[in-house]
């Protein structure tokens, strides 16, 4: 099966995966040895609405990509692997936060490789949708680690939030600066960081909110520079 068609099939399967677990709203607090009720590392619930745009844009990208059988060949193997893992992620997350965290990092690494292999042309249809997807995964992967660290007692909730919000910021700034294109990557991270700030505003973890907000502002610089190229 040509990879272009496989990517389209997997994009549709990925978008349809929420139907397997209707009503999924993140890890259950009691899935961890130490219950994670409103952990400060997690963004406000509205932020997850970005998945609708990610799903639609990836499908549209895959459809457009059928007209680019060879020009997009470099990015397709890793993108297909990321989407294949993503299509199974929600059912796994219902069963095991540990395995879900492992899988989301597999999704992230393969998505980033695909992003760096996207063609210079067709940015709106290739690099930009993959960038949005990889950007959100960059934030979500760090959040998952933060939840595990606090949920298994390796760190306090506040310490885990500080550590893994910083990790998300450093990872995202490094990727966006090195990539120097696909500003949607930075936009997705900014969206996530602002949602972390909203989640923590006016709570005992307001410092985490300020950290996330500063990180979001810092991300604007490499994002804007990438938009000019």
Image (cartoon, rainbow, N blue to C red):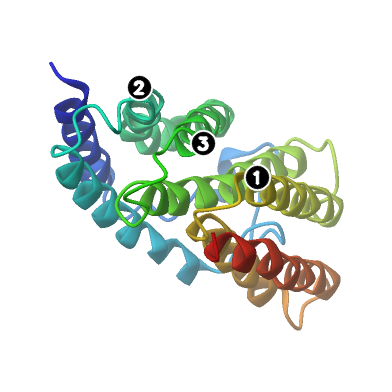
146 or 110, nearer to the observer: 110
Task: Identify which residue is drawn at 28% across, 48% down.
Answer: 58
Residue 77 is marked as 2
- Residue assigned mark 1: 175
Residue 85 image position (x, y, % from top left): 38, 27
Q: Mark 1 or 3 closer to N-term? A: 3
Say which of marks 2 and 3 sits in front: 3
The quadrant where residue 48 appears: bottom left
92 or 180, nearer to the observer: 180
Q: Residues within 10 Å of mark 2 (few under 14, many from 20)?
A: some
Q: Is residue 28 above or below residue 223?
A: above
Image side of residue 71 versus residue 213, left or right: left
Cα distance in 3D space between marks 2 and 3: 13 Å
Q: Is residue 79 above or below residue 146?
A: above
The quadrant where residue 195 appears: bottom right
* Residue farthest along the bottom direction in this orientation: 202
- Residue assigned mark 3: 116
The quadrant where residue 179 appears: top right
């Amino acid at each position: 099966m040509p990879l272009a068609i496989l990517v389209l099939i997997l994009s549709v399967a990925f978008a349809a995966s929420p139907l397997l677990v209707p009503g999924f709203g993140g890890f259950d607090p009691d899935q961890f040895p130490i219950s994670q009720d409103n952990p400060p590392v997690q963004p406000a619930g509205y932020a997850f609405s970005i998945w609708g745009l990610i799903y639609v844009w990836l499908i549209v990208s895959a459809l457009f990509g059928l007209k680019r059988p060879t020009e997009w060949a470099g990015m397709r193997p890793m993108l297909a692997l990321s989407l294949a893992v993503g299509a199974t992620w929600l059912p796994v997350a219902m069963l095991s936060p540990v395995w879900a965290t492992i899988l989301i990092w597999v999704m992230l690494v393969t998505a980033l490789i695909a992003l760096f292999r996207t063609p210079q042309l067709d940015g709106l249809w290739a690099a930009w949708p993959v960038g949005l997807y990889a950007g959100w995964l960059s934030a979500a992967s760090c959040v998952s680690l933060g939840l595990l660290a606090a949920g298994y007692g390796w760190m306090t909730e506040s310490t885990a939030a500080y550590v893994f919000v910083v990790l998300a910021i450093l990872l995202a700034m490094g990727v966006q600066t090195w990539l120097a294109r696909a500003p949607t990557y930075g936009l997705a991270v900014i969206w996530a960081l602002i949602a972390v700030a909203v989640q923590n505003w006016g709570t005992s973890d307001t410092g985490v909110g300020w950290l996330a907000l500063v990180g979001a502002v810092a991300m604007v610089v490499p994002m804007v520079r990438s938009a000019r190229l």
